[in-house]
Image (spheres, rainbow, N blue to C red):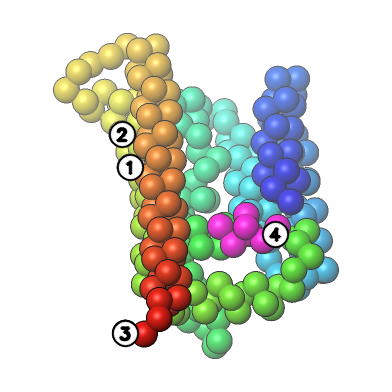
């Protein structure tokens, strides 16, 4: 359930961070996602991707907060959300076609969309049937593979490029020199522009994949000439 795995932890973090500082908001807010991940492992014998991603990102945020006394860490955290760094790393690694035994690594967005469309750890559908169905689509249809590869590149490398732009702004490496206040405002604007752009690109790719799927279905229903 996306509420327990994603929405609740994020909402808890932002609410708790108003009243509590340091490690505690990260650790407390990561609890629902961690519970969902453990529940998925026990009940369905599978890793809950969204729950584990949220849990890992919040845990990484807790580690960052431990070293928050470092002025450079404070500055970087002020200008960019370093909590999302594990997401970038996992997204980029998932693009490597790693194969261990019968396991074949797919792009991260493949797993995220599978969780979103099938209910994740709290789904009543058979995990085996879900995996077989999605793997069959992956093997059989090029548009399916390309779509999730492009989406993973967008969210992995795209958000990483945003971080590089923010670092340039922080250290005044851009042609236009700015005060810290203006640099912070500009970096926040860039962040939301980047997110909006990636969301629109993702929506475009999803709609394109659906059209290609509908076209294949329509072509298969045509009577032979």
Q: Could you tell which of marks 2 and 4 lies nearer the N-terminus?
A: 4
Percent across and percent down for residue 94 are 46, 65
Task: Determine the secondary structure under disc 2.
Answer: helix
Per the model, the C-alpha gap separating discs 2 and 1 is 6 Å
Q: Of circles 4 and 1, which is in front?
A: 4
Residue occupied by mark 4: 120
Residue occupied by mark 3: 225
Q: Could you tell which of marks 1 and 3 lies nearer the N-terminus?
A: 1
Q: Of circles 2 and 3, which is in front?
A: 3
Nearer the observer, 41 or 208: 208
Horizontal side, residue 56 vs residue 180: left or right? right
Task: Determine the secondary structure under disc 1.
Answer: helix
Per the model, the C-alpha gap separating discs 2 and 4 is 34 Å
Residue occupied by mark 1: 161
Percent across and percent down for residue 69 are 57, 28
Q: Residue furthest left?
A: 175
Bounds of the magenta segment: 113-119
* Magenta-span inclusion, residue 206: no
The image's mark for residue 165 is 2
Task: Determine the secondary structure under disc 3.
Answer: loop
Nearer the observer, 195 or 19: 195
The residue depicted at 62 percent of the width and 54 percent of the height is 116
Q: Of circles 3 and 4, which is in front?
A: 3
Percent across and percent down for residue 217 are 45, 71
């Amino acid at each position: 359930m996306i509420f327990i795995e994603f929405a609740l932890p994020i909402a808890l973090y932002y609410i708790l961070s108003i009243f509590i500082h340091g490690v505690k908001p990260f650790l407390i807010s990561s609890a629902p996602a961690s519970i969902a991940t453990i529940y998925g492992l026990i009940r369905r014998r599978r890793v809950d991707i969204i729950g584990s991603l949220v849990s890992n990102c919040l845990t990484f945020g807790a580690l960052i907060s431990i070293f928050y006394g470092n002025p450079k860490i404070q500055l970087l955290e002020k200008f960019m959300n370093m909590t999302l760094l594990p997401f970038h790393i996992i997204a980029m690694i998932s693009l490597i076609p790693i194969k261990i035994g019968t396991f074949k690594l797919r792009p991260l967005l493949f797993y995220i969309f599978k969780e979103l469309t099938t209910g994740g750890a709290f789904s009543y559908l058979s995990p085996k049937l879900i995996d077989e169905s999605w793997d069959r689509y992956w093997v059989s249809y090029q548009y399916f593979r390309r779509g999730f590869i492009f989406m993973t590149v967008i969210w992995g490398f795209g958000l990483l490029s945003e971080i590089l732009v923010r670092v340039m702004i922080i250290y005044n490496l851009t042609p236009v020199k700015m005060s810290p206040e203006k640099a912070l405002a500009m970096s926040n604007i860039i962040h939301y522009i980047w997110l909006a752009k990636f969301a629109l690109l993702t929506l475009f790719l999803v709609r394109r994949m659906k059209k290609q799927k509908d076209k294949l279905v329509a072509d298969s229903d045509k009577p032979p000439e």
